[in-house]
Amino acid sequence: MPAYSEYPIVEERTLRPPQRRLGLFPRRNPDELPETPVGTVLVFALNGGYKAYTEGQHLRGSEDAVVEARSVSVVYMRNRQVTLAIEIPSRDMGYQFLLKVAFRCRVTDAEAVVSAGIENAADVLTNHLRDDAQLMRLGTTRPIEEVHLLSEEVTNRVRAYLEFYPPRIDGLEVALVNVDLLPPNDILVHGQRIKRLKWDGESKELESAIENRDVARIEEIFKRGAEATVAFGVSREQLLMTDAVGITREARENRMKALSDLINGMPDGALDFLPIDTHRLIERMVTSVTGDSLFAEAPKAVEPPAPGAGRSFQNGHDGPRRIGLEDLDD
C-alpha cells in the first residue's frame, strides 16, 4: 500500500482551458493530468457535478468530462488503515495520556468524496472523537502512572461512542479496528529504568545467596581437614592428583611431628596425674591428627579407677597407684 500523506484524496490539480484543434474540436493534452497509481481513480470537477473514471481506464483527452473539467482529483479507492492520535489530559499537570485509535476505511463513492472535500479522513475522525466531552475528561481522575487502569475505561468509552455516534463521511466506509492508551514517552523510559533497577537488585540478591551457600559449604569442607580440602581442589580441577597426594602426605607428616613434639614436651610421668586411660588418649589423638589407628587392635575400654581404689604398697601389693599431693611433699 503506497504511503500517501493524505487520504482519500491523494492529489488535486487545477486544469487550464483546453486547446481547440483546427478551431473546431477542443482537446486536452493527457500530459496535463496527474498520474494514477494502482488503486486510484481520477475525478473531474465539472460545472455543477463530478465525473469519476474507473481505475485503469486510459484517457485520450477528448472525453467531454476531461475537456470541460476545471480541476481534477486523484482518489485512493482501496482499503486503508487510518491511525489517529489524541492527547487526553491526566490528573498530573503537564502530562497527557496518548490515545491511539485505528480505523479501516474504504472509499465507496469517489465522486461523493471529492464533492464533500474529504482531503484527510484522519482529521475528520479525530475531530469526531474530540467531540465526546466525557472521553476527554476520563483521564483527569487518574495520575499519569495509572495508564494501565484507565486503558479499559477509555477503550469501552470509545467503542460505545462510535456505536451510538458513528462517523458519517460522504463516500467513505469506516470501521473501528483497535484502541490503545499509552503514557508519555518519558514516563515509559522512567518506568523501564525502575523495572531494570528492581531486576538488577533481585539478581544481585540471588547471586549473594548462592555465593553465601557456596562459602558455607567450602568452610565446612575446610573444617574437615587437609584431606577434604585437597579433595575439594581436585574436584574443582584446581589441583592435579599427583600434587594432591604430595600435599596430603606432607600434611600428615606435619601432624605426626606435631603429635610427637607434644608428647615429648610433657614432663616425665605427667600422664600419671590425669584420671584417664593413657592408651585411649594416645589412640584418639593419633586418630584425630593422622586419620589412622596407631594400634593394630584397640583394647577394650577400661573404666578409670575411682579415687582411692588403687592398690597400695602398704598392703604389699605392687601395682600402680594414684599419686596425691602428700606424695609430692615427700
Image (cartoon, rainbow, N blue to C red):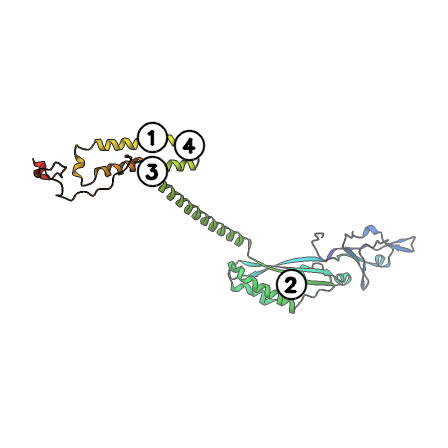
Q: Residue at x 64, y 63 (%)?
A: 127
Residue 251 seen in the current view: yes
Q: Give neighbour class at mark 4: few <14, some 14-19, many 20+ (Cα, 10 Å).
A: some
Q: Is residue 7 left or right of residue 237?
A: right
Amino acid type assigned to the residue bearing label 3 in the image: Gly
Q: Which residue type carries mark 2?
A: Asn
Where does label 4 land, which residue? 241
Q: CA distance from mark 4 to mark 1?
A: 14 Å
Give the mark nearer the N terminus: 1 vs 3.
Answer: 3
Q: Secondary structure at mark 3?
A: loop
Residue under circle 1? 250
Alpha-carbon distance for marks 2 and 4? 82 Å
Task: Give the residue drawn at x 71%, y 63%.
Answer: 173
In the image: residue 157, left or right of residue 229: right
Q: Disc 3 marks which residue? A: 225
- The quadrant of the picture occupied by the C terminus is top left
